[in-house]
């Protein structure tokens, strides 16, 4: 079977080599929003252009998945001179073709400029955003066309599957995964090898492999990038898992908010089936495995594994009590293996390079690399992959390029609404499963939202509680009623109406919800409150006792005033005010009717004389 | 429940969708998605029809339809606007953008669709485009790095196209 893949790979390489210089244009969701489809169209039109002379080189435009550096999109990578162009617009295409592709010269003005040294940087690897990363599970994202199986083959796709089918027993595969120390990348961090072993041991004539692509954490998009940018790696990982546990059918559950991921997965599955990498007698072996796609319909709780299974069965996506665990009684009552997208994406790499290779990254108990979606108030936002155990400081200040607009770092929320916040004292904490749990946070899916001094931490806690309260499915009382009451207290606090007793009650409720809820959603919902209370209790107290929002965010706790000595009476603010709260006579100072004012701050931004202030 | 409209619904479309999915219980969510795609919302009559066709109780179908936020039992506008209020968008100012949209479209609190059935707004939790925060999606087109002013320009352009 290895020889089939090898032959196919050589054939694919020959075909791709004959298409000329490769122009890799990012077509991930971020770059598409920045206009990459127009850039691609321009390149393709130019490819057909009559102006091309015989000595000019051919080129092919390759639509790739996410490169990760979404902030600087549209990204165009041309490997022949090893350069990355950033913020490319469709107007720049002609210059790139004429100067770079036909002329062999780099278009300097489109290169990334290092904000620290002000120098132009040619290669991806030299941009600080990339140079500090270790991209393994993301290694193909951005380098291949995800809609062509040949491209995946050229970078070693399906080699690991062929190898296990030809050389290894299911037990050997499970042993390699166990030895590698891979842990679930979706949040919990459960050892993947053990999960596989439990499902393999379950006796049944029918078993399922399910991939959890219901990436619901606000602020996380690594799974989307893998599904969009390297779908064949996910399919290969699932097929290897199916072989190891003895399953012949699989499901990928993708949230409906990711239409592009769904489309690319469908294309990939279809081509893999047509060419014998999925379906019956895979690569001539006696293994059968088919994959179906199930679209979610917008329910965060479906990221919880038992709720996800209920949703695949067409039910309301509500969690079920464990045990029985899915490994024994899962989808349609059959033994089921559920792993997250990123977990499966690591599998082919581990099989190909060995457990020891995987262990060479990360820490003793958290092996390998982890992707993080770095967002919020950092200079470089985007998708990154680093060895487990990298410190928060390296991520925010080296890869992320520090805080925007020279502001001060205040906190980073990790793990979304189930996670906790990390503060300045955690900057040198190694980011791995166990250290983060100790700090009252969790790796979660890897969403990392950075906040600066202008962020009100109480408001952020309220925001997350609002999220979990809305998403609570309502099955168990602690979560349904607890989150509702916690939210009510937090709303009182940000409106300046709470008492110190409310704060005690909030804390008590938080522990009750954490201990009493049925599933992970409820058990982790109080985390943002508990961790912010731990590190920023003084901010809560400022809201309650002093009726002040230290960050100046909570609008109920501020008033907007016009300073009469600065106001020239231009009337601009009165015209912009959405509620008509400002009135006055032209050329004399205006006044704000505080009973009407909704404190939106539009007037503050509008005033040309800086006469309006929030106090 | 849904607002009843005067137009009579072509429920034969519902029948053929249910049939395409083999009347299978596990396909209920996919069936609801297709039906919603067809009518732009889930009319009450269509839900009942699905239940009858699939031999399920109307409560079961209604229960699934109301569980998932993607489903709407009210008619939606021609332009469906999703304002992302995920963490990253929230800290970069999605709420001022939302307020600007509301005042631009003259929407009351709690009102989601404009009187002329042109625009429907809803907030969603993370569209996964956090690198471009704050984002607004209008009929699947992503508008990155929105500000109250920028979204006003977008809305004006759309309204002009319609006028």
Image (cartoon, coloured by chain):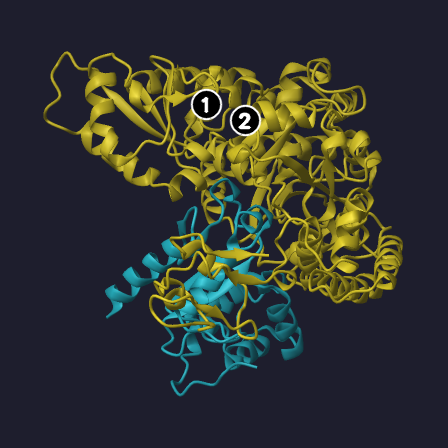
Determine the chain carrying the residue at label 1. Answer: A
Whole-percent x and y of residue A359? Answer: 73, 17
| Chain B colour as displayed | cyan
Residue A56 in which image quadrant: top left
* First along the sequence among labels 2 and 1: 1
Please tell me the colour of chain A: yellow
At horizontal 49% and vertical 76% (from top left) the residue drawn is B108
Q: Name the spot of residue A19 as percent of width and height, x first.
A: 28, 20
The lab-note entry on whether marks 2 and 1 share a chain reads yes
Residue occupying the far bottom of the picture = B6
Q: Is A532 displayed left or right of A4 in the figure?
A: right
Circle 1 sits in a helix, a strand or a loop, which is it?
Answer: loop
A277, above or below A513, in the image: above
The residue located at (43%, 77%) in the rendering is B12
Q: Quadrant of the C terminus of chain A?
A: bottom right
Q: Quadrant of the N terminus of chain A?
A: top right
Residue A401 - label: 2
């Amino acid at each position: 079977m290895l020889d089939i893949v090898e032959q196919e790979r050589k054939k694919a390489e020959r075909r791709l080599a004959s298409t000329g210089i490769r122009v890799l244009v990012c077509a991930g969701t971020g770059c598409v929003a920045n206009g990459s489809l127009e850039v691609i169209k321009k390149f393709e039109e130019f490819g057909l252009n009559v102006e091309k002379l015989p000595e000019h080189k051919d080129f092919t435009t390759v639509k790739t998945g996410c490169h990760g550096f979404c902030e600087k999109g549209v990204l165009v990578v041309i490997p022949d001179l090893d350069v990355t162009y950033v913020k490319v617009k469709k107007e720049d295409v002609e210059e790139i073709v004429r100067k770079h592709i036909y002329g062999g010269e780099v278009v300097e003005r489109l290169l990334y400029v290092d904000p620290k040294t002000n120098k132009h940087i040619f290669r991806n690897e030299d941009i600080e955003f990339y140079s500090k990363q270790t991209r393994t599970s993301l290694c193909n994202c951005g380098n291949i066309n995800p809609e062509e199986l040949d491209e995946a083959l050229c970078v070693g796709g399906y080699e690991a599957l062929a190898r296990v089918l030809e050389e290894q027993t299911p037990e050997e595969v499970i042993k390699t995964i166990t030895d590698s120390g891979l842990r679930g990348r979706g949040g919990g961090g459960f050892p993947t090898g053990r999960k596989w072993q439990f499902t393999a041991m379950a006796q049944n004539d029918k078993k399922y492999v399910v991939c959890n692509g219901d990436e619901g954490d606000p602020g996380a998009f690594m799974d989307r990038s893998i599904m969009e940018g390297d779908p064949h790696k996910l399919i290969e990982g699932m097929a290897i898992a199916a072989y190891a546990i003895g399953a012949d059918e699989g499901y990928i559950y993708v949230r409906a908010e990711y239409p592009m991921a769904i489309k690319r997965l469908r294309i990939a599955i279809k081509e893999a089936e047509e060419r014998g990498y999925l379906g019956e007698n895979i690569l001539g072996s006696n293994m059968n495995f088919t994959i179906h796609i199930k679209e979610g319909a917008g329910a965060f709780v479906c990221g919880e594994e038992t709720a996800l299974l209920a949703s695949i069965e067409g039910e309301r996506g509500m969690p079920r009590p464990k045990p029985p665990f899915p490994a024994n009684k899962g989808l349609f009552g059959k033994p089921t293996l559920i792993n997250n997208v990123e977990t499966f994406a690591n599998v082919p790499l581990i099989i190909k390079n060995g457990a020891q290779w995987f262990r060479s990254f990360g820490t003793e108990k958290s092996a390998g690399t982890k992707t993080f979606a770095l967002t919020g108030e950092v200079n470089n936002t985007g998708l990154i992959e680093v060895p487990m155990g990298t410190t928060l400081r390296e991520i925010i200040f080296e890869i992320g390029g520090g805080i925007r607009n020279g502001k001060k770092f205040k906190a980073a929320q990790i793990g979304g609404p189930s996670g906790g916040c990390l503060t300045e004292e955690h900057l040198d904490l190694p980011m791995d499963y166990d250290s983060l749990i100790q700090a009252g946070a969790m790796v979660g899916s890897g969403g990392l939202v950075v906040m600066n001094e202008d962020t009100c931490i109480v408001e952020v806690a309220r925001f997350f509680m609002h999220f979990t309260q809305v998403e609570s499915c309502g099955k168990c009382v602690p979560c349904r009623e607890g989150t509702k009451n916690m939210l009510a207290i937090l709303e009182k606090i940000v409106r300046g109406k709470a008492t110190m007793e409310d704060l005690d009650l909030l804390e008590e409720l938080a522990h009750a919800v954490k201990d009493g809820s049925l599933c992970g959603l409820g058990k982790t919902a109080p985390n943002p409150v508990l961790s912010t209370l731990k590190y920023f209790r003084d901010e809560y107290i400022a809201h309650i006792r002093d009726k002040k929002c230290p960050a100046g965010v909570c609008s109920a706790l501020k008033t907007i005033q016009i300073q009469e000595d600065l106001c020239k009476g231009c009337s601009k603010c009165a015209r912009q005010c959405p509620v008509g709260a400002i009135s006055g006579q032209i050329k004399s100072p205006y006044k704000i009717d505080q009973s009407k004012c909704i404190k939106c701050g539009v007037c503050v931004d509008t005033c040309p004389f800086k006469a309006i202030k929030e106090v | 429940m849904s607002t009843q409209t005067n137009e009579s619904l072509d429920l034969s479309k519902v029948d053929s969708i249910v049939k395409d999915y083999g009347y299978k219980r596990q396909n209920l969510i996919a069936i609801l998605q297709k039906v919603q795609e067809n009518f732009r919302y889930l009319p009450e009559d269509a839900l009942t029809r699905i239940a009858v066709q699939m031999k399920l109780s109307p409560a079961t179908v209604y229960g699934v339809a109301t569980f998932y936020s993607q489903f709407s039992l009210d008619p939606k506008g021609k332009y469906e606007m999703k304002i992302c209020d995920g963490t990253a968008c929230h800290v970069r100012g999605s709420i001022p953008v939302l307020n600007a949209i509301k005042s631009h479209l003259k929407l009351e609190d709690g009102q989601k669709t404009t009187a002329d059935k042109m625009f429907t707004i809803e907030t969603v939790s993370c569209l996964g485009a956090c690198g471009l925060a704050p984002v607004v999606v209008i009929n699947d087109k992503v508008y990155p790095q929105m500000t109250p002013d920028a979204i006003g320009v977008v809305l004006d352009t759309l309204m002009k196209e319609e006028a």
